[in-house]
Amino acid sequence: MTPELHQKLTAWRQHLHAHPELSLQEKATAAFVQEKLAELGIPFEAGIGGHGIVATLTRGHARSRVGLRADMDALPITEDTGLAYASKTPGVMHACGHDGHTTSLLGAAALLVADTSWSGTVDFIFQPAEEGYGGSRAMVAAGLFDRFPMERVFGFHNWPGLEAGTIAVHDSVVMAAGGRVTLTIEGHAGHAGLPHLSRDPVMAAGHLIVALQSIVARNVDPLDTAVLSLCMIRGGTAPNQIAGQVEIKGTLRTNRMPVRDAIVDRIEQICAGVATSFDVRVTPTFVHGVGPVINTPDEADIARIAAQKVQARLRGDLPPSMASEDFAYFLQQRPGAFVWIGNGELREGAELHGPRYDFNDAILPVASGWMAEVAKTALASN
């Protein structure tokens, strides 16, 4: 990558960082992407599964076709970086690096436009609504793989704590299946000084939270991996009234679907037991995301070859993460691989989804270069 292109991509990335948009609201981001694709002379279709965009570049006569994906949405987090290009949207920031992913894919498009050494078709997938809103599923439902019949699909996520520019490729599971859990506890409101006339959902909630933490510790095989995190609790409106209802929300992550199903069964059993013990009603609700991100063997090999071509340090020894990624839904439709590219030193508060996080612009040449090379390698392998 030339210094001039790196400088241009850095400016694009910092513009996107300053103007983040939440899932399902990526209108201006999508417009920016379309503007840059037009400048590169790459035709595209917009409005796919929401604000999704697919740009298509064909060269030569080869029939092979490959997809490259980046996500575009931001998070409802207040930025605390103090950067000159910090978010201008109160309460919203690119705390996961999707601004960098989008820019890297634009960079890969620029590299492939300038490269005459390959033949085939590359589809550049700019996906909306990755952060828990099913953007990949919506694009597939809108006919992504019928309208753009790619044979393989690749993507990446920046990874704080991994040396900048290092590429990590997993042989199988990369990231966990994700899902949301909501527990609604309904009791009977009453005067705090007359507790015997009420049925206290707050007390039931306390016992429920403690009991649910036993599931991973005592009901999941230690050789399996699972996380049940209860992250929100809401109930009550006055300090001298026993509330009538409490709501608890959290997330469930597993690497294997049978483990997820067993945990769901156990949550339901514990909820029923707590309901009986405290004479309240406990209703668990589950919203299951897609399954785990699992690389297919041939495509993992292609990802490694592409990493070597951009002369990046290659790692194959990292365990999977219990974070989730809806790229998994693409991998349920087509073979492919999802890699991590090191974002550099992990600083407190600058983790993924942290208020002081920022994508490292120094890795743009590696990220864009890897995406371009993985496309070329995949096309050549066919």
Image (tube, grey):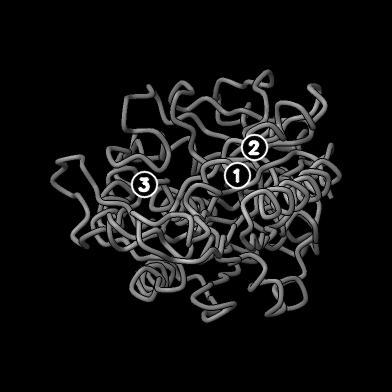
**Residue sitting nearer the eye, 24 or 240:** 240
Asked where in the image residue 172 lies, by quadrant, the reply is: top right
Which residue does the image show at 65% across and 66% down from the upper left?
58
Q: Which residue is identified by label 2?
A: 211
**Residue sitting nearer the eye, 193 or 322:** 193
Q: Which residue is identified by label 3?
A: 95
Disc 3 crowd rating (10 Å Cα; few below 14, some 14-19, many 20+) is: many
**Residue sitting nearer the eye, 114 or 289:** 289
Marks counted in the figure total 3
Indicate which disc, 1 or 3, sits on the residue closer to the N terminus.
3
Asked where in the image residue 347 lies, by quadrant, the reply is: top left
- Coordinates of residue 129 in the picture (x, y in percent): 51, 65
Disc 1 crowd rating (10 Å Cα; few below 14, some 14-19, many 20+) is: many
Does the residue at mark 2 contact the one at mark 3 (Cβ under 8 Å)? no
The correct choice, above or below, for 22 with respect to 196 in the image is: below
Which residue does the image show at 54% across and 53% down from the upper left?
112
Q: Which residue is identified by label 1?
A: 208
**Residue sitting nearer the eye, 7 or 326:** 326
Q: Is residue 178 left or right of residue 8?
A: right
The correct choice, above or below, for 340 with respect to 263 in the image is: above
**Cα separation between marks 2 and 3:** 32 Å
- Coordinates of residue 49 in the picture (x, y in percent): 59, 77
Which residue does the image show at 53% across and 54% down from the upper left?
249
**Cα separation between marks 1 and 2:** 5 Å
